[in-house]
Every structure is written in structure tokens, then in C-alpha cells.
Amino acid sequence: MGLFDFFKRKSEAEQLSPFEQELAEHGLLEWLRSSFTVEERQKIEVESRRRSRSATPSTPEGTVLLLRAIAPKGALGDRVLEKAETVASESKDQLVLDRFHSALIDRHLSARGADPAATERAIAACRKMIARAAEVKKTLLERGDSTLPRHHGFEQLAILLEKQGAFDEAISVSRRAQDQGWAGDWEQRIDRCERKREAAREVGTEEDREKPVVPEAVHQEEDASSRP
């Protein structure tokens, strides 16, 4: 690098805002400029000012934490989080992506009052986290953990499915989590969902019994009377 280039870069760095400088330290400045309009970048910067200021290390997990912190609500924030997911998935540490998916579930759950699609987004994030559960389990056991913690993806998916009345799948998800060894009240959840499923079937059967039966002869009369 020549002396001119050195001073040029130094001058450019001095013109960056603190927000841009922080992104540059994480290798995110060019991504920000190429992925968002000026107006969108301003909205992201405004969001970044609302967070509590603390230095984030220039590691994959630190970069993911930074992106999560500056992501506004709504579609714009989702685009920021797409970058966070990419960074997390490229990390050698399996747990970085797992923790990201856990936080993503909570983000969507907290948006349910304002976003009609938030529940389905949360379910999708749960399924992503569950898809990697076996790998994460292996990582935790190799790390020396003697028992597995609660699994946010399994737990929240079971809760959401139960609320939707999808008892068969809620039971299946709970059994899968239990079989893998994740901590949780899986047996109680399975028992509860089985009771609710049986109650729903009884209600359905009762409704079928209460439906009026129209004699065949009446059908024929109606058909005949409707002819021209």
C-alpha cells in the first residue's frame, strides 16, 4: 500500500459515523451499503441507537449479536437477520446458529399482536432449529455436558401446535424431543394433548349424531319439485 492510499483510507475512516465504524470492524460496511437504500440505512442506524452500547467482539457470534441488535421490526429487520443467519451458519461453532434460531423464534413470537403471519414465522424458525437438534446434541455431549438442556425449538413448536389444535403433531414433536433426551415436561404434555385429542374426537362424534337425517324420499321430492 502506498502512502497516498494509506492516507486516503485513513481519511475515509475518519468520515464514518460511529455506527458505520462498528459495522466496518465486523466486515459489514460494504454489505450495508450494497444491500440497502440510504433511507433504509438511516432506519437501521436509528434502531442501532436504541440499543445499549457494548463492544461486540469481531467473531461470528459477536457479529450475529450486533446484527440482531440493529435489526428493526418488520420486513427491513428480517433482511438484516438474513445476513445474521448467513454469518451464523458459516461459523464453525454449531451453537452460534442454534442460539440465533432460538432468538429468532422469540422475535416472531413477540410480534404476534401486530403481524398475522408471525405465528407461522415462529413455527418455521422452530422447525429450522429442530432440524439441527441432533447435531447440537452431539456438540453439547462432546463438550462435556452430562445432560441436555431444554430445547427452545421443540418446546415452542409443541406449544404452538397444541394451541392450534394440531394434537397429533404436537404429540409427535414432544415424543421426538423426549427420545433425543432434551429436558422438559414432555410426558405431561403428551398426556394433555392425548386427552384434548380424545375430547375433540368425542365432540366431533357428538356433532355428527346431532345432524338431522333427511329421509331419502324427501330428497327425491325436492329433486322432482326443482325440475322445470
Image (cartoon, rainbow, N blue to C red):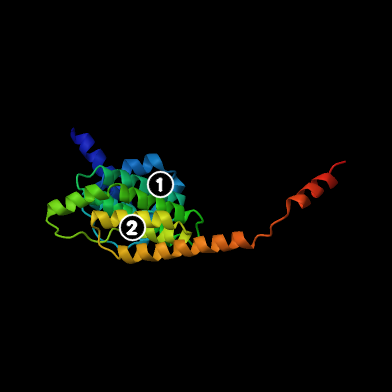
Instruction: Kindly indicate the quadrant of the structure image that contains residue 223.
Output: top right
Residue 26: x %, y % from top left: 25, 47
| Residue at (42, 65) in percent of width and height | 195
Q: Which mark is residue 79?
A: 1
Residue 155: x %, y % from top left: 34, 60
CA separation in Å, label 1 and label 2: 32 Å
Residue picked out by circle 2: 174
Residue 174 position (above or below residue 82): below
Q: Nearer the viewer, residue 34 or 59?
A: 59
Instruction: Kindly indicate the quadrant of the structure image that contains residue 166.
Output: bottom left
Horizontal side of 12 relative to 118 (left or right) equals left
**Residue type at tag 1:** Arg
**Residue type at tag 2:** Ser
Labels 1 and 2 touching (C-beta < 8 A): no
Q: Nearer the viewer, mark 1 or mark 2?
A: 2
| Residue at (35, 54) in percent of width and height | 173
Q: Nearer the viewer, residue 7 or 79?
A: 79
| Residue at (29, 56) in percent of width and height | 177
Q: Secondary structure at mark 2?
A: helix
Q: Secondary structure at mark 1?
A: helix
The N terminus - image quarter: top left
